[in-house]
Image (tube, rainbow, N blue to C red):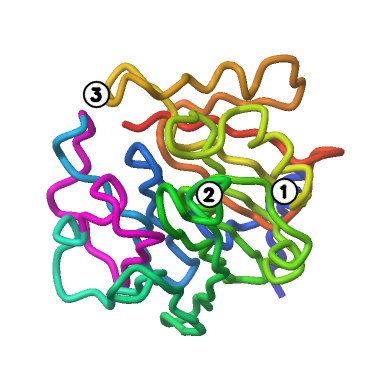
């Protein structure tokens, strides 16, 4: 019998169970280990970002119907479209779906601190694949209630808006992350970059200021292994390109 020796490095590096790619604003591609693909909150091409023209996916999720989150035409092919709100935008869709090996569900939230009176409703999408749970908070506009926290449940990776301007700012985002207590990773989104034309957004810096567990990734893609390697959840700042 021929035995192949593996280096300690190889043994210590677990295989990713998923990948996340950021295309700017709140738009991410989630890829499972088996190749399932879901695009979240597809970004338009008129706010400064240039997502790939050949982006394909099995499904698209839309947290709410504002233009910078709902460019479903961005995704090629015939993906399933899972919308967080009802057609009249006055209620939440109760989504419990399976996209290949990715489970998808929603929790209703508000786009502002006045129970949606100013900006309407939004939805948190929770994805689970390979034993890892990822929460995309959409345009959350307020701290979470106890009921919402319970409904969201245990989370490994949270995608959280931090730039303010019609969603939570860095201070509230910090509070929300503390409410959710993700096990592995915090990925900021919806903040000002050198590309975005929405200048009212704040940059990511106030959110990461004073933190010691911040990694600025070289690129827009990150692997999710499911293995906790830090004492606390790591804040990973992705580039949009």
Cβ atoms under marks 1 and 3 closer than 8 Å:
no
Given residues 35 and 67, the one toward you in this image is 67
Q: Which residues are magenta?
A: 48-71
Cβ atoms under marks 2 and 3 closer than 8 Å:
no
**x 65%, y 65%: residue:** 132
Mark 3 neighbour class, 10 Å CA radius: few under 14, some 14 to 19, many 20 or more: few
Measure the alpha-carbon separation of dots 1 and 3.
31 Å
> Which quadrant holds residue 122?
bottom left
Percent x, y for residue 205? 56, 16
Query: Label 1 belongs to which residue?
Result: 184
Measure the alpha-carbon separation of dots 1 and 2.
21 Å
**x 74%, y 51%: residue:** 182
Please tell me whether mark 3 sits on a helix, a strand or a loop: loop
Given residues 94 and 189, the one toward you in this image is 94
> Which quadrant holds residue 221?
top left
Percent x, y for residue 2? 68, 69
Measure the alpha-carbon separation of dots 2 and 3.
21 Å
Residue 143 got which mark? Answer: none
Magenta stretch encompasses residue 58: yes
Mark 1 neighbour class, 10 Å CA radius: few under 14, some 14 to 19, many 20 or more: many
N-terminal of the two: label 2 or label 3? 2
Query: Label 2 belongs to which residue?
Result: 140
N-terminal of the two: label 1 or label 3? 1
Given residues 79 and 130, the one toward you in this image is 79
N-terminal of the two: label 1 or label 2? 2
The N terminus is located in which quarter?
Answer: bottom right
Please tell me whether mark 2 sits on a helix, a strand or a loop: loop
In the image, taking residue 1 as reference, residue 223 lies left or right, namely left
Percent x, y for residue 135? 58, 58
Query: Label 3 belongs to which residue?
Result: 197
In the image, taking residue 67 as reference, residue 21 lies left or right, namely right
């Amino acid at each position: 019998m021929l035995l192949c020796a593996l280096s300690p490095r190889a043994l210590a590096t677990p295989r990713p169970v998923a990948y996340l790619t950021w295309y700017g604003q709140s738009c991410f591609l989630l890829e499972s280990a088996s190749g399932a693909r879901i695009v979240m909150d597809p970004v338009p091409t008129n706010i400064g970002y240039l997502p790939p023209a050949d982006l394909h996916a099995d499904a698209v999720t839309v947290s709410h119907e504002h233009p910078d989150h709902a460019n479903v035409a961005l995704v090629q092919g015939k993906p399933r479209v899972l919308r967080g709100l009802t057609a009249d935008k006055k209620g939440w869709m109760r989504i419990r779906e399976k996209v290949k090996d990715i489970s998808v569900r929603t929790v209703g939230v508000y786009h502002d601190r006045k129970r949606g009176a100013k900006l309407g409703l939004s939805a948190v999408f929770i994805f689970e694949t390979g034993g890892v749970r990822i929460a995309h908070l959409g345009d959350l506009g307020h701290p979470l209630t106890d009921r919402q926290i319970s409904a969201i449940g245990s989370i490994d990776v949270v995608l959280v808006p931090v730039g303010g301007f019609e969603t939570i700012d860095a201070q509230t985002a910090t509070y929300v992350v503390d409410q959710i207590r993700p096990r592995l990773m915090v990925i900021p989104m919806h903040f000002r970059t050198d590309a975005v034309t929405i200048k009212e957004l704040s940059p990511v810096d106030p959110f990461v200021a004073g933190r010691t567990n911040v990694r600025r990734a070289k690129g827009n893609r990150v692997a999710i292994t499911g293995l906790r390697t830090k004492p606390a959840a790591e804040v990973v700042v992705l580039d949009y390109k």
